[in-house]
Image (tube, grey):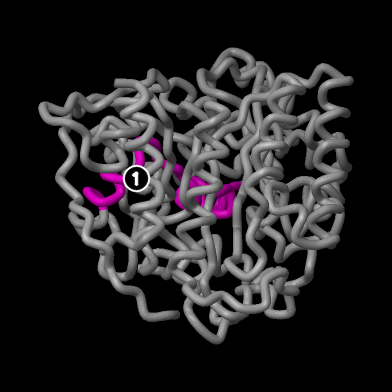
Amino acid sequence: MKQKLSRRDFLKLAGATSAGLALSACGVKATEVSLSTPTILSTETSTHQPTSTVTPHPPETIREFADALKIKIAVMLNTDKLDNPQYVTTAANIANEVMITDDLFFRYIFSQFDFQKVIDNWDTVQKQLADGQIPFVDEILWNPWGRGEAGGLFSIASQYNMEVAIDNLLWSEDIPPSLLSSNFAKSDLTKIAEYMLKAKMLRYKDKVAEWSVISEPVARNLWGDSKSAFWERRIGYPNIVHLAFTWAHEVGAVGQLNLIEDNILDATTEDARQQAYNAFFQLLDDLKQNQIPIDGVSFENNFWVFAPPSAESMLETINKVQGMGYKVGHAQTTVVLSDKFPIEPNRRRTVNTVDDKLQAQAQIYKDTFEAYTQTNSRFGYYGVYDGDSWYKALGTSDTDAAPLILDEDFNPKPSYSAILDVLKELYLQKT
């Protein structure tokens, strides 16, 4: 089978190593925490409706506590690893929402699509989309890797009673090759973007709790070129953001419509991130003033133990977003341990030395998780365990990032215990 290019591979190929676009091991000793098999309630198709696992015993795992407290925690699953039962059950023990990313990327499902058909038949295409139909539906490769639609993740979500989030509906790193090399006029590219976005949403409109309608538009606009900021350069910024949410709203799909951005919750760690932070809130002001139908925002939290985010600043930022009337959607959290930050090896440290990297990582996870739970926001990790890290395949770091709460053998790290301790305290307060 042809090897799949993942998000991490694409970032490497795109050369995302500058201070802007990059803003997007050590020996690990396991902490003794049990990971039990989650209770399975249903095998029906997952919907947007919140679900919870009924446990016949007091909560033990992160998932059980989260369900009992009605806290949502998302996890990105790598479909290459779904044949490992331990991988799947572990994911269902640490989260209750599945992020779908690579297996529904436009560059895969539209890799053999003739976009000229959309242009030549636009009046008909537009009418069919408005009627809830997907034009040329049989020409879209909904299952490009032979694992089932969306890599089989809807089935996993249903089996383990997990909600679903679809990320990166419009993302400038996810461009079908034929579009990347095309000379379509701006007006025609706008039609193509609307068609692709609505086609994917219509396909799964009743099965998704959260949609990341557009990803990283602020960072792309600030630092991207014609390739890495494809939509922002070819259609325009912030116009592409306005259009994306308008199109998504027109679909009438269930689920929260989010904008997702990086470099926001750790903005105080350096000037470039502060620049992104300021531009991010300018964009939110713009969307509000123009009455763009957006429900919320999500954050890519790519943190580093040598430049830890401020707990107070994270809470302040989330409160500021919510004060503007926006919800906070699922996070994509990693906390890197390596001495150099992957894809940005020259990133400046704000902490020169870290005596215990695992404990430093755990403190960042704790601070971040508390900021989310205190504001009734959805948390999330970008991966299940260190062996699944999106940094792992980059090849740009001198040591492994080890950025997740489980080590490469699925053993809980102090970060797992830190999150579990927060949940236990909340549970005691509730009961």
Q: Is residue 185 left or right of residue 408?
A: right
Q: Residue at x 38, y 24 (%)?
A: 70
Does the magenta segment cover residue 95?
A: yes
The span picked out in magenta is: 88-113
How packed mark 1 is, by other alpha carbons closer than 10 Å (few <14, some 14-19, many 20 or more), is many
Label 1: which secondary element: helix
Q: Quadrant of the C terminus?
A: top left
Q: Is residue 86 left or right of residue 172?
A: left
Residue 6, given in percent of the width and then of the height, sits at 50, 63
Answer above or below: position of 45 versus 362.
above
Q: Quadrant of residue 331?
A: top right
Q: Which residue is at a point 50% across and 43% down the rendered structure image?
A: 369
Per the image, the residue denoted by label 1 is: 420
- The residue type indicated by label 1 comes to Leu
Q: Is residue 362 magenta?
A: no
What is the x, y in percent for residue 185? 87, 45
Residue displayed at 78% across by 68% down = 19
Q: Quadrant of the N terminus?
A: bottom left
